[in-house]
Image: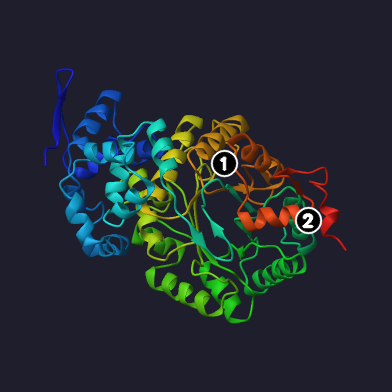
Amino acid sequence: MRLKTKLFGTLYEFKDLNEVMAKANEEKSGDQLAGVAATSVTEMIAAKEVLSEITLKDLRNNPAVPYEIDEVTRIIQDQVNERIYREIQNWTVAEFREWILSHSTTSKDIARISRGLTSEMVAAVAKVMSNMDLIYAAKKIRVTAHCNTTIGEAGTLGFRLQPNHTTDDIDGIRISLFEGLSYGIGDAVIGLNPVNDTVDSVSNVLKMFQEIKETHNIPTQNCVLAHVKTQMDAVKNGAPSDMIFQSIAGSEKGNTAFGLDGAIMAEAQDLMLREGTSTGPNVIYFETGQGSELSSEAHHGVDQVTMEARCYGFAKKYNPFLVNTVVGFIGPEYLYDSKQVTRAGLEDHFMGKLTGVPMGVDACYTNHMKTDQNDIENLAVLLGAAGCTYFMGIPQGDDIMLNYQCTGYHDASSLRELLGLTPVKEFADWLETMGIYENGRLSARAGDASLFIK
């Protein structure tokens, strides 16, 4: 494994593969904060050149965090299909990139090869791709999952209806939910971020969601995004939940900071398959975001793109229905401006789909970042073109509870029309039945929340 190269008359040497991986990243403020970033553009290019000649076998044999000390590494390594891995182990990262981008390589081909990959391989190939490469490659990959409905089908774009409220007031949540439905939002999931992480509060919201679903025959799924253990206790007490949510990290230490491990997630998955209210096999919802491991001092000196890829390797084990990166939520310490957020969103989406999980993106930003709503709309269009599975939908794109900005209720119809996409089929049919859609577009009744008030 060669870890040096000469570029423009200067010899660049890297002490190990983790340093190559880190310095091959496009500029990220989080990598700079961690002290692992390239110190110049030429050093970054040199690292990319070295990385392009690394084999997939080298990456398999040198995980970012050692197998012996990290559960996430063990989960990623142990689920590799060894037969498929042996077919590709001698490919270089450059050859892997060319294979993915080849016109003759299909979605089915990529889905098969993904079973032989580790997260380090996924991260490595993303690092040697341009933004257009990431869009083109992700567009080719189709990953579907089924909870009550099927997400990720070709020609569809889903939205999570996120009716957050500053006090978890049931009536306030209900009105926001009705407004979102009236704009065609909610086919991916009706999912609330709760203020109160208590069993009673979570149960009350889930019961309200279920009542609305049943009253109006809405073909979707519900979730309250409390801690996994709180949700499990609510389900054990009879709360009607279609799936269980949890934020995850790319290292065991990071997951410990979130209060979970692999055993807890396996228990949650088993519980939902036995006691959940969904009809399908995919009953887990994960959220991620570049920089979370650094924020909890759990990054092991590894760059944030590689750590993010490892999140998807961990998620894959639990056959999730939804995975999304909350790409601009953590702040400018990790992604400084719109250029970095855009790159991260395209990287995360591609890496998730290459790993084999149904991937959405919360195209978002916080108010102290060097970005604005135009930047996030640009990212949403790029991700829509890349075949993103779903986005978030909140009133006016302004989450008054989490205090951040993302895609709003009104953006759904614009993005779908612009890109020639529809909601999930069953949900689209329901929208037509309700008169919210007419011939595949929002009708004159769209935005009228009184449709749901009897």
Whether residue 119 is visible to the viewer of this picture, yes or no, is yes
On screen, 448 above or below 274? Answer: above
Regarding mark 1 in the picture, which secondary structure is present there? loop
Residue sticking out furthest to the right: 454
Asked whether the beta carbons under mark 1 and mark 2 sit within 8 Å of each other, the answer is no
Horizontally, is 171 left or right of 345 in the view?
Answer: right
Q: Residues within 10 Å of mark 1 (few under 14, many from 20)?
A: many
Q: What's the residue type where badge 1 is placed?
A: Cys
- Spatial separation of the CA atoms under disc 1 and disc 2: 30 Å
Q: How was the colour assigned to the protein in this rendering?
A: rainbow
Check the image and name the residue furthest to the top. Answer: 8
Dot 2 corresponds to which residue? 434
Dot 1 or dot 2: first in sequence order is 1
* Residue 386 place in picture, x, y as percent: 47, 39
Kindly identify the residue that appears in the image at 77 percent across and 68 percent down: 215
According to the picture, the residue beneath numbered tag 1 turns out to be 364
Say which residue appears at 33% left-offset and 37% top-offset.
Answer: 101
Viewer can see residue 164? no
Quadrant housing residue 367 = top right
Q: Position of residue 432 (x, y in %)?
A: 74, 52
Q: Residue furthest left?
A: 1
Question: Which of the 4 image quadrants contains residue 53?
Answer: top left
Check residue 276 in the rendering and tell me which mark sits there, or answer none: none
Badge 2, how many Cα within 10 Å: few under 14, some, many 20+?
A: some
Q: Position of residue 123 (x, y in %)?
A: 32, 45
Residue type (three-letter) at the residue carrying disc 2 = Met
Q: Nearer the viewer, residue 346 or 368?
A: 346
